[in-house]
C-alpha cells in the first residue's frame, strides 16, 4: 500500500516547523503508513523524557498551539562521563517506525570535540548533530524500529562546557504491520441456519492506527455506518464508534443473503468480512386430510397433516386431538392417530426452520379437521302383519266424568262441577284366532273284561300364537296409504331408542327420485312405524343419519304396489247392429310416458273376453275409443273394459276399469219410444170399436 501523504506547513520561530522530507520513502508498498505529528498545532504526549543530573530535559507540546521551546536537552554542569539525557518515544504494537523528521533543529556544543556528544537514534542506526546541522533534518531508517529519540551524552570525566540540543517539532513516519480487525460481532453475525424477524446486531473494531470508518450491509443494503475524525498527533488516530442496533430482516430479501462488514483505518487500510445469512419471514402453511366419518370397527384412524410454504422448510408439526396434550411430529408431514367412539377435532399448526432471537419458530395458523368415529348400525324395513288375532269394529258407550270449572254467578267467580256425560265411540276389539286341528288321543276301554288302549282321532280348537309376518311388498288400492315398519340398532344387536329415521320413497319407474315420505322416532326397543301417504307404486327405504356416537346406515328396499285406476264411460249404451259407440275415460294419477302403448281394450260376453286392441292415450291420461259393430241379428249384451299394461316408465301396476255392459240389437231409445206410442194409439182405437 502507498505511503500516506501528509501536507506540512513551515511556521515561524514562534511556532514550529513540520515538513515532509522531499523524496523520502519510508516503507514497503505492501504495508500502509501513517504520519504522527509531534507539536506544531497538535497536542500530544508521544515523547517521554529521561533526564539525569547535569542534563535537563525541557519542553512539552503546549495546547492549543506551540509558542516556542519545543524539546530541549542542555548542560547544567556537574555531569560525569556516560551520563545521558534523552527524549524517546516507543511505538505501540502493530506499528513500527521507518523514518522521522526533526524541524527547527538547534545543536551547539555537541560533537565538536568538547564535552558532549549526541544526536538522534533508533534501532540499528542513528545520526549525530553539531553546529552545522540543518534546521530540518530528515532521517530514513535502514530497518524498521520500535523506538526513536534524541540524546545528549557526557563524554569526559567531567562535562562543564555548554551544550544544547533542541527540536521545535517532530514528524514520525510509522508503518502499520497489521490492519483493521473486527471485535467478535454479535447477534445477527453469530446466527446459524434460518432466521426471522428483528435481530440485534453489535459491531465494533480496531486497528493499531485507529479505525476511522465502520459499516455493515445486508444484501447490499446499508445497515449502518459510523466514522471518526483523525487525530494525527496520536499513534491511535481514529476511534469509530461501534454499531449497535436491531436489524429488521423483513426489510430484506428472503433466502440466502450476504452480511458484509467493512472498515478503514488511519493508515488507509481497508478491511471487509462477509458471511451468508438465511432469512425466512414467510408464514408457513398446514393442511389436513383424512376420513370425516369412520366406523369403530375400522380401528385407529389417521389424519394427515402436511406443512409447507416456507423457503426454510418445515421443522415440525404440532397437533392436538380434542384439545388434549400437544404432540410434536418432526418434518413436514405427520400422521395423527385418532381413536375412541364419538366426535373428534384434530388441530395442527406447522413451524418452519426460521427462528427469532428468542428461539421461536415461524408458525402457521391453526387448521382443524373434524372426524367422527361411530358404532356401525343396521336399519331394517318391512311390511309387518300381526297374525293370531281376529279384530272387528264395535261401538261402545264411554262415560266422561264431570270436571271442576270456574263460572261467574252474580258477579262472582265460583267453582262448579259439571255433570258426567256419555258418548258412543268406535273401537277395535280383538280376540285370539283359533283353528280346528286333528289330533290323535289314546283311550282305555274294556273289552271282554279287559282294559285295552285304543287310538282315537279327535278334532280340537287351538289358539294361533301371535306373530309377525314380514313382507317386502304390499299391494295397496289406488288412493289409499299404508304403513311400513322397521327396527334400528347397532350391528351388535343393541336397540337404539329415540333416534330419528327418515323414510324415503321413489316412484317405481326407474327414476330413483327419492324424496322424504315420513320421519319417525324409534321406540325404546328400537322399533318404528311410518305412515305412507297415497301415491303410485313406490320403492321405499329407511335411512338413519347417525349420531355423534353411531354411524349412518340405510335399509334394503321394499315395494308398494298400487294398480292404476281407470275410469270409463260408454255412449250410447243401447245400439243397433252396424252402429258405433264412444268409449271415453281417463287413467288417474301418475305421468303417462310419451309415445306410450299403455292401454288395452278388453271386450267380452259373459265370462269370455279377450284383448281387442291397444288404444292411444294422451299425456294427461285421457283417451277416446270409437268402436263400430258389424251388421247382425238378435240381441246380445257385450261388455267393455280398459286396462293398463305393465310399463317400466309408468309408476303404477296394471289395473283395469269396471266392465260396462251395453245392449246390442235393440232399437235405440228414441225408436223404441215411437214404437211404444204407436202401439198405445192402436190399442185405443180397438177399444173404441168394441164399445160401439
Image (spheres, helix red, strand yellow):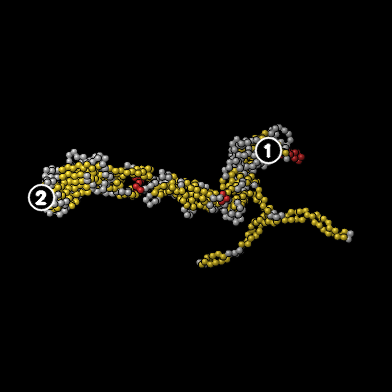
Asked whether 687 or 415 is in front, the reply is 415
Vertical relation: 425 (above or below) 350: below
Residue at mark 1: 602
Q: Give whichever of 603, 488 is nearer the camera.
A: 488
Q: Position of residue 563 (x, y in %)?
A: 64, 43
Query: Mark 2 Cα within 10 Å, few/some/many (few <14, many 20+)?
Result: some
Residue 671 makes an appearance in the image: no
The residue under label 2 is 162
Q: Closer to the camera, 209 or 485?
A: 209
Q: Nearer the viewer, residue 604 or 2?
A: 2
Circle 2/circle 1 CB separation < 8 Å: no
Q: Position of residue 436 (x, y in %)?
A: 75, 54
The C terminus, quarter of image:
top right
Q: Residue at x 11, y 48 (%)?
A: 114
Element assignment for label 1: strand
Left or right: where 242 falls relative to 325: left
Residue depicted at x 67% and y 55%: 393
Tell which residue pokes out farthest to the right in this image. 448
Q: Could you tell whether 669 is left or right of 257 in the image?
A: right
| Up/down of 229 relative to 451, above or below | above
Q: Earlier in the sequence, mark 2 or mark 1?
A: 2
Q: Position of residue 124 (x, y in %)?
A: 22, 44
- Front tag of 2 and 1: 2
Gap in angstroms between the C-alphas marked 2 and 1? 168 Å
- Left or right, 127 with reference to 650: left
Q: Is residue 251 visible?
A: yes
Q: Position of residue 27 (x, y in %)?
A: 23, 41
Q: Identify the residue at image location x=28%, y=45%.
A: 178
Amino acid at each position: 500500500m502507498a505511503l500516506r501523504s501528509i501536507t506540512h506547513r513551515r511556521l515561524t520561530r514562534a511556532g514550529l516547523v513540520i515538513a515532509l522530507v522531499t523524496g523520502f520513502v519510508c516503507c514497503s508498498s505492501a504495508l500502509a503508513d501513517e504520519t504522527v505529528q509531534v507539536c506544531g498545532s497538535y497536542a500530544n504526549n508521544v515523547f517521554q523524557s529521561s533526564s539525569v543530573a547535569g542534563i535537563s530535559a525541557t519542553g512539552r507540546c503546549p495546547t492549543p498551539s506551540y509558542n516556542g521551546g519545543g524539546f530541549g536537552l542542555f548542560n547544567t554542569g556537574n555531569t560525569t562521563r556516560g551520563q545521558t539525557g534523552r527524549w524517546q518515544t516507543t511505538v505501540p504494537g502493530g506499528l513500527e517506525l521507518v523514518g522521522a523528521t526533526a524541524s527547527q533543529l538547534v545543536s551547539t556544543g555537541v560533537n565538536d570535540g568538547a564535552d558532549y556528544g549526541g544526536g538522534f537514534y533508533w534501532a540499528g542506526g542513528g545520526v549525530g548533530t553539531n553546529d552545522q546541522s540543518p534546521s530540518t533534518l530528515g532521517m530514513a531508517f535502514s530497518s524498521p524500529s520500535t523506538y526513536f529519540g534524541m540524546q545528549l551524552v557526557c563524554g569526559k570525566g567531567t562535562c562543564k562546557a555548554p551544550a544544547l540540543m533542541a527540536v521545535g517539532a517532530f514528524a514520525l513516519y510509522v508503518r502499520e504491520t497489521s490492519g483493521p480487525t473486527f471485535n467478535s460481532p454479535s447477534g445477527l453475525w453469530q446466527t446459524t441456519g434460518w432466521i426471522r424477524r428483528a435481530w440485534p446486531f453489535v459491531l465494533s473494531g480496531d486497528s493499531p492506527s485507529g479505525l476511522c470508518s465502520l459499516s455493515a450491509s445486508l444484501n447490499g443494503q446499508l445497515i449502518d455506518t459510523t466514522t471518526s475524525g483523525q487525530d494525527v498527533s496520536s499513534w491511535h488516530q481514529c476511534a469509530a464508534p461501534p454499531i449497535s442496533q436491531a436489524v429488521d430482516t423483513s426489510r430484506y430479501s428472503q433466502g440466502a443473503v450476504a452480511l458484509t462488514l467493512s472498515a478503514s483505518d488511519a493508515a488507509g487500510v481497508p478491511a471487509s468480512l462477509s458471511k451468508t445469512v438465511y432469512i425466512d419471514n414467510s408464514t408457513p402453511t398446514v393442511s389436513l386430510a383424512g376420513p370425516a366419518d369412520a366406523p369403530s370397527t375400522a380401528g385407529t384412524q389417521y389424519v394427515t397433516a402436511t406443512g409447507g410454504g416456507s423457503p426454510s422448510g418445515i421443522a415440525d408439526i404440532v397437533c392436538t386431538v380434542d384439545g388434549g396434550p400437544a404432540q410434536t411430529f418432526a418434518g413436514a408431514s405427520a400422521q395423527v392417530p385418532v381413536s375412541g367412539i364419538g366426535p373428534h377435532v384434530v388441530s395442527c399448526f406447522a413451524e418452519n426452520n426460521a427462528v427469532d432471537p428468542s428461539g421461536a419458530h415461524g408458525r402457521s395458523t391453526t387448521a382443524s379437521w373434524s372426524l367422527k368415529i361411530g358404532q356401525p348400525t343396521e336399519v331394517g324395513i318391512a311390511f309387518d302383519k300381526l297374525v293370531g288375532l281376529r279384530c272387528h269394529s264395535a261401538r261402545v258407550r264411554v262415560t266422561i266424568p264431570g270436571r271442576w270449572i270456574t263460572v261467574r254467578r252474580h258477579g262472582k267467580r265460583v267453582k262448579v262441577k259439571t255433570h258426567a256425560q256419555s258418548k258412543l265411540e268406535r273401537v277395535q276389539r280383538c280376540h285370539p284366532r283359533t283353528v280346528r286341528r286333528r289330533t290323535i288321543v289314546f283311550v282305555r276301554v274294556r273289552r271282554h273284561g279287559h282294559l285295552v288302549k285304543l287310538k282315537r282321532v279327535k278334532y280340537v280348537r287351538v289358539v294361533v300364537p301371535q306373530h309377525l309376518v314380514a313382507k317386502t311388498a304390499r299391494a295397496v288400492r289406488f288412493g289409499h296409504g299404508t304403513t311400513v315398519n322397521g327396527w334400528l340398532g347397532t350391528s351388535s344387536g343393541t336397540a337404539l331408542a329415540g333416534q330419528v329415521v327418515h323414510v324415503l320413497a321413489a316412484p317405481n319407474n326407474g327414476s330413483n327420485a327419492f324424496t322424504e315420505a315420513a320421519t319417525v322416532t324409534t321406540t325404546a326397543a328400537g322399533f318404528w312405524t311410518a305412515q305412507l301417504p297415497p301415491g303410485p307404486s313406490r320403492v321405499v327405504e329407511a335411512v338413519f343419519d347417525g349420531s355423534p356416537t353411531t354411524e349412518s346406515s340405510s335399509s334394503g328396499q321394499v315395494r308398494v304396489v298400487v294398480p292404476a285406476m281407470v275410469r270409463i264411460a260408454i255412449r250410447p249404451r243401447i245400439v243397433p247392429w252396424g252402429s258405433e259407440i264412444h268409449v271415453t275415460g281417463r287413467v288417474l294419477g301418475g305421468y303417462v310416458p310419451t309415445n306410450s302403448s299403455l292401454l288395452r281394450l278388453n271386450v267380452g260376453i259373459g265370462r269370455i273376453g279377450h284383448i281387442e286392441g291397444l288404444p292411444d292415450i294422451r299425456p294427461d291420461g285421457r283417451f277416446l275409443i270409437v268402436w263400430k259393430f258389424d251388421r247382425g241379428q238378435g240381441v246380445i249384451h257385450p261388455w267393455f273394459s280398459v286396462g293398463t299394461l305393465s310399463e317400466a316408465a309408468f309408476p303404477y301396476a296394471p289395473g283395469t276399469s269396471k266392465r260396462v255392459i251395453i245392449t246390442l240389437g235393440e232399437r235405440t231409445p228414441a225408436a223404441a219410444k215411437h214404437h211404444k206410442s204407436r202401439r198405445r194409439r192402436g190399442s185405443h182405437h180397438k177399444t173404441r170399436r168394441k164399445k160401439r
